Image: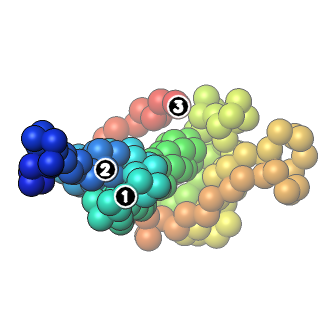
């Protein structure tokens, strides 16, 4: 507050100088700063407050809040996208793993037979071992390729063999050590 000299009338004139402030810009700046402490969650709000604060002088805090809030919002968007993509990836892996369970069950039955007899069963004997093992309602089937290699799979929903909807997996008895079961266990693995 400043005082002017007394006037000729004997009164004193008082001039009040108003401080110029930008509450919206300051609020945006503070919210953007706090937003960084919350891993960017409040940064978009701080960004918007600072953006609206740019229309009123002084603009210093509004500009700083706009930059800090913008960077925090980008961080939040990148983190959110990475999180969503991670969830999608985990879901995809789980789906693929679940789809492979019937093939693994059927392979374990065939591998167990190989471990007990020392040779792969014939097609008829292998299919008899797989009775009750299904995938998507279709019975699993077995095909012997040679002395060490076989396939398990289904003929698909069209019930026509060797068409595009058939799903087969090829196994070698010597390469699939993870499928070897204790030869004393003769039970058939349960289907999902």
Q: Is 15 on the left or on the right of 172, as rendered?
A: left
Q: Residue at x 9, y 49 (%)?
A: 6
Answer left or right for 7 relative to 186: left
- Badge 1 crowding class, 10 Å Cα cut-off, few under 14, some 14 to 19, many 20 or more, is some
Q: From the viewer's side, name the closer residue of 6 and 75.
A: 6
The residue tagged 3 is: 191
- Secondary element at image label 1: loop
Q: Are marks 3 and 2 in contact (CB under 8 Å)?
A: no
- What residue sits right under mark 2 in the picture? 22
Residue 24, located in which quarter of the rendered image? top left
What's the distance in space between the residues labelled 3 and 2, CA to CA?
68 Å
Crowding at dot 3, Cα within 10 Å, few <14 / some 14-19 / many 20+, comes out as: few
Rendered location of residue 108, percent (x, y): 46, 48
Label 2 to label 1, Cα distance in Å? 6 Å
In-front residue for pair 49/58: 58
First reached walking from the N terminus: tag 3 or tag 1: 1
Tell which circle, 3 or 2, labels the residue nearer the N-terminal end. 2
The percent coordinates of residue 176 (x first, y second) are 43, 64
- Neighbor class of circle 2 (other Cα within 10 Å; few <14, some 14-19, many 20+) is some
Please name the residue shown 27% across and 53% down the image.
20
Instruction: Indicate the secondary structure of the residue bearing disc 2.
Output: loop
Can you see residue 175? yes
- Looking at the image, is 164 positioned above or below residue 131? below
Circles 2, 1 touching at the beta carbon (< 8 Å): yes
**Vertical placement of 176 versus 192: above or below?**
below
Decide which of 128, 23 is in the foreground and name it. Answer: 23
**Residue 44 showing in the rendered view:** no
Q: Which mark is residue 57?
A: 1
Residue 126 placement (x, y as % from top left): 62, 46
3 vs 2, front mark: 2
């Amino acid at each position: 507050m400043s005082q002017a000299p007394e006037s000729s009338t004997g009164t004193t004139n008082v001039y009040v100088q108003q401080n110029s402030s930008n509450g919206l810009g300051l609020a945006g700046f503070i919210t953007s700063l706090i937003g960084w402490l919350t891993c960017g969650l409040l940064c978009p709000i701080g960004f918007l407050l600072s953006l609206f604060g740019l229309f009123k002088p002084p603009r210093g805090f509004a500009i700083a809040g706009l930059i800090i809030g913008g960077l925090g919002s980008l961080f939040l968007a990148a983190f959110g996208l990475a999180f969503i993509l991670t969830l999608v990836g985990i879901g995809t892996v789980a789906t693929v793993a679940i789809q492979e369970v019937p093939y693994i069950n059927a392979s374990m039955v065939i591998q167990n037979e190989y471990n007990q007899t020392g040779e792969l069963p014939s097609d008829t004997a292998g299919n008899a071992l797989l009775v009750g093992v299904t995938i998507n309602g279709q019975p699993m089937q077995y095909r012997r390729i040679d002395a060490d290699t076989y396939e398990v799979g289904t003929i698909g929903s069209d019930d026509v063999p060797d068409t595009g909807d058939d799903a087969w997996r090829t196994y070698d008895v010597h390469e699939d050590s993870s499928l070897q079961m204790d030869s004393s266990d003769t039970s058939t693995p349960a289907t999902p």
